[in-house]
Image (cartoon, rainbow, N blue to C red):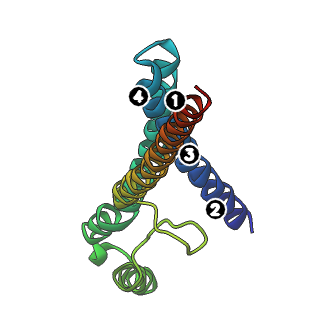
Amino acid sequence: MCGRAYSGMYAMYCILVLLTTVVAAYGCLTEILDHGLSLKEAGLFLISFYCMSLLFIICNAAHQTSHKMGPEFRERLLNVNLGAVDRRTRQEVNMFLTAIDKNPPIMNLNGYANINRRLISSATTSMATYLVMLMQFRLSLMRNAAIAARKAAMLNATLENASH
């Protein structure tokens, strides 16, 4: 039960890291485009970098743990001198080796996603996709505002010319 609670907590933490990184990166990009580079943009960039570093630490630790409990632990068990132990111990070691081979240790978030180094690349890809979409929305809003401003200016110019 405790494992599921931690798993859910880390799943929410990873989602929070993803969301915070996207929002901070979007804020940084829009502020740079609007006002140029300043300390505020540097702070937003630092937040994005910090969140991505946390995601890397989590994913790398899960990868290292899975590797230590999988292939490295299997190798240690294979190096045990089974001739020096009793039959029951040999049988237990062989059953454990079979269990490791058939079901390798993989850390996951309650079955939603496996935590490994691939999660970093998929999260980065998702963040880049969201950033591109947000920037496209922003550019279309800016374009529509510019068109509306031109139409309003033309209408004002037409009204002024008509009044003279």
Q: Mark 2 to mark 4: distance in Å?
A: 39 Å
* Residue sitting nearer the eye, 99 or 26: 26
Labels 4 and 1 touching (C-beta < 8 A) = no
Q: Where does label 4 land, which residue?
A: 33
Q: Where does label 2 land, which residue?
A: 7
Q: Residues within 10 Å of mark 2 (few under 14, many from 20)?
A: some
Labels 2 and 4 touching (C-beta < 8 A) = no
> At 52% across and 29% down in the image, what residue appears?
47
Q: Which mark identifies residue 70?
A: none
Q: Residues within 10 Å of mark 4 (few under 14, many from 20)?
A: few
- The kind of secondary structure element at disc 3 is helix
The percent coordinates of residue 21 (x first, y second) are 51, 41
- The kind of secondary structure element at disc 2 is helix
Q: Amino acid at mark 2?
A: Ser
4 vs 1, front mark: 4
The percent coordinates of residue 121 (x first, y second) are 33, 55
The percent coordinates of residue 116 (x first, y second) are 39, 59
Q: Amino acid at mark 4?
A: Leu
Q: Mark 3 to mark 1: distance in Å?
A: 10 Å
Q: Is residue 164 above or below residue 10?
A: above
Quarter assignment of residue 8: bottom right
> At 29% across and 66% down in the image, what residue appears?
71
- The kind of secondary structure element at disc 4 is helix
Q: Mark 4 to mark 1: distance in Å?
A: 18 Å
Q: Where does label 1 land, which residue?
A: 47
Q: Amino acid at mark 1?
A: Ile
* Residue sitting nearer the eye, 19 or 27: 27
The percent coordinates of residue 27 (x first, y second) are 52, 33
